[in-house]
Image (tube, rainbow, N blue to C red):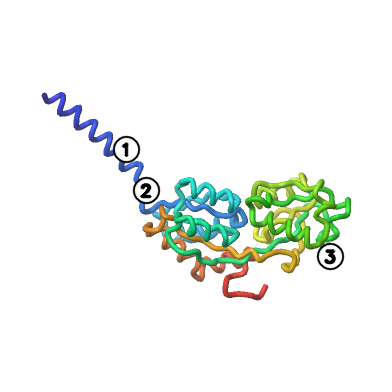
Amino acid sequence: MIRRLLQGLLVLGAVWTSVTTAAPADNHITVAAAADLHQALDDVVAAYRHDHPDSRIDVVYGSSGNLLTQIEQGAPFELFFSADSGYPQQLVDHGKAGGTPVPYALGHLVMWSASIDMKGVQVADLAQPKFGRIAIANPQHAPYGKRAEQALRAAGIWDQVQSRLVFGDNISQTAQFAQSGNAQVGLVAESLVVNSTVKGSFVPVPPSLYEPLKQSFVLTQRGKDNALAQDFASYVQGAQGKAILSRYGFNLPDDTAH
């Protein structure tokens, strides 16, 4: 009888341990973030954790479209930072969001090269063979890739450069292609190169050639009642968060000058 009782207590203990281990901790969140935020958001997280050392914030970076699909399929993210405000709105429309989208930045597209001096180069100049392979993010699911295609089409050279295009899965991989020499020029996020220690040069792509990269974030259904997710979201919108984003070339929603 005693042996059975002890065995039963052990089983209950094991079940309780598995349940408590599986339950999400109040001091831990996982954030889905557009790849253009890789450096900037890493700095924001580091600054936040300096003030909240008991908090754990893991960030998964990728293309906004792919991250949206993952969240809709049940991926365990509490926050979604997108490079295109349309994707968080889709979460709302599909009943997968825990709030309304909040604008946090305006992104910028640039032409970057590790081997070519880009000073004075215009988008239309990329039609010249001397610019070699051109890296852009996949327009199907990466907002910066969609804007790169728009810019190349607006400049009238899309058909001429198509055979020389190299596609990155997201804008971070696209920048790596350009930095490694797999492409001679990359149409990438300014935020990934403005503070880069890698030797190279870049010039802005005129904003008139592509739709604005209005970026927003949203709490997911999983994160709507999570205090850490809510507090970190507020931090990104606060003075320290905005200052860090600004250092990486992001316009702020209430800042039209750049």
Q: Which mark is residue 33?
A: none
* Residue that badge 2 annotates: 24
* Residue that badge 3 annotates: 120
In the rendered view, tell whether residue 161 sits above or below residue 119. Answer: above
| Front-lying residue, 106 or 175 | 106
As measured in the structure, the alpha-carbon distance from the residue carrying label 3 to the one carrying label 2 is 52 Å
Look at label 3 and name its amino acid.
Answer: Gly
Q: For the point 40% across and 58% down, which residue is it? A: 224
Return the disc, 3 or 2, that comes first in the chain's sequence.
Answer: 2
Q: For residue 197, which quarter of the picture?
A: bottom right
Return the disc, 1 or 2, that comes first in the chain's sequence.
Answer: 1
Crowding at label 2, few (<14), some or many (≥20) Cα neighbours within 10 Å? Answer: few
Where is residue 83 shown, x and y percent of the image? Answer: 60, 59
Circles 3 and 2: CB atoms closer than 8 Å: no
Q: Secondary structure at mark 2?
A: loop
Q: Secondary structure at mark 3?
A: loop
Circles 1 and 3: CB atoms closer than 8 Å: no
- The image quadrant where one finds the C terminus is bottom right
- As drawn, the residue found furthest toward the left would be 1
In the rendered view, tell whether residue 8 sits above or below residue 130. Answer: above
Return the disc, 1 or 3, that comes first in the chain's sequence.
Answer: 1
Crowding at label 1, few (<14), some or many (≥20) Cα neighbours within 10 Å? Answer: few
Where is residue 130 shown, x and y percent of the image? Answer: 88, 51
Q: Secondary structure at mark 1?
A: helix
Crowding at label 3, few (<14), some or many (≥20) Cα neighbours within 10 Å? Answer: few
In the rendered view, tell whether residue 45 sits above or below residue 239. Answer: above
Left or right of 35, for residue 221:
left
Where is residue 27 shown, x and y percent of the image? Answer: 38, 53
As measured in the structure, the alpha-carbon distance from the residue carrying label 1 to the one carrying label 2 is 12 Å
Look at label 1 and name its amino acid.
Answer: Ser
Residue 175 visible in the current orientation = no
